[in-house]
Image (spheres, rainbow, N blue to C red):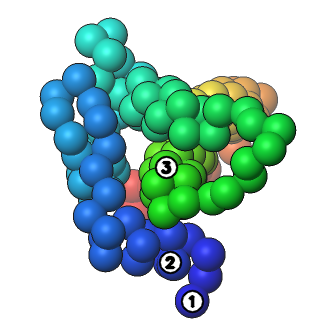
Amino acid sequence: MSNNDSMFEYATRNKIRFASTRGDLSAETLWEVPLRSRDGFDLDAIAKGANKALKALTEESFVSTERTAAHEKAETTLELVKYIIGVKLAEEEAAKKRADNRVEKEKLLRILAEKQDGKLSELSVSAIQKRINALET
C-alpha cells in the first residue's frame, strides 16, 4: 500500500473532516472543491485552515516534543489537501497543454493548407486541366 493509500485510509477510518466556508467536508468531497474561487470556497483556503490548525497544535516548545494523535490527524489533514491540490494542479497543467497543442495544430494545418494551395497554383495550365479531367472521371 502506498503512502497516499495509507493517508486516505487513515482519513476515512478516522472520519477526518476539512473545515470550509460551507461546512465540514469529507476527503472524497475535496475532489469537487475548486482550486481557486472568488468566494473563499476553494482548496487554497481549506489548506490554509488545515495549516493553521497544525501550527496551533505544534506551537514551539523547547522542552516537550511529544506527538499526540491530534498531531497525526492535523498533519494528515494538511497532507491530504496538499496532495489533492497537487493532483488538480497537474490536471490543470495537462489540460492547458492539450489546449495549447490543439491551437498550434490548427495553425499548422492552416499553414499546410496554404502551402498546398500555393503548390497547386504553381502548376501549369495543362497540368491543372489534366488533374481536373482525372477528378471528373
Give the labeled residue for mark 1.
1
Judging from the image, what secondary structure is the residue with disc 1 in?
loop
User: Is any atom of residue 116 visible in this view?
Assistant: yes
Comparing 86 with 25, the one in front is: 25
Q: Which mark is residue 5?
A: 2
Q: From the top left corner, tell me how far across and down residue 113 is, in percent.
A: 62, 35
| Proximity of marks 2 and 3: CB atoms separated by less than 8 Å | no
Give the labeled residue for mark 3.
74
Judging from the image, what secondary structure is the residue with disc 3 in?
helix
Judging from the image, what secondary structure is the residue with disc 2 in?
helix
Q: The residue under label 2 is which amino acid type?
A: Asp
Name the residue furthest left. 22
Q: Considering only vertical position in the picture, is 23 above or below 135? A: above
Mark 1 Cα within 10 Å, few/some/many (few <14, many 20+)?
Answer: few
| Proximity of marks 1 and 2: CB atoms separated by less than 8 Å | yes
Label 3 vs 1, first from the N-terminus: 1
Apparent side of residue 1 relative to residue 127 in the rendered image (left or right): left
Q: CA distance from mark 1 to mark 2?
A: 6 Å
Q: From the top left corner, tell me how far across and down residue 103 is, in percent.
A: 57, 31
Q: CA distance from mark 2 to mark 3?
A: 17 Å
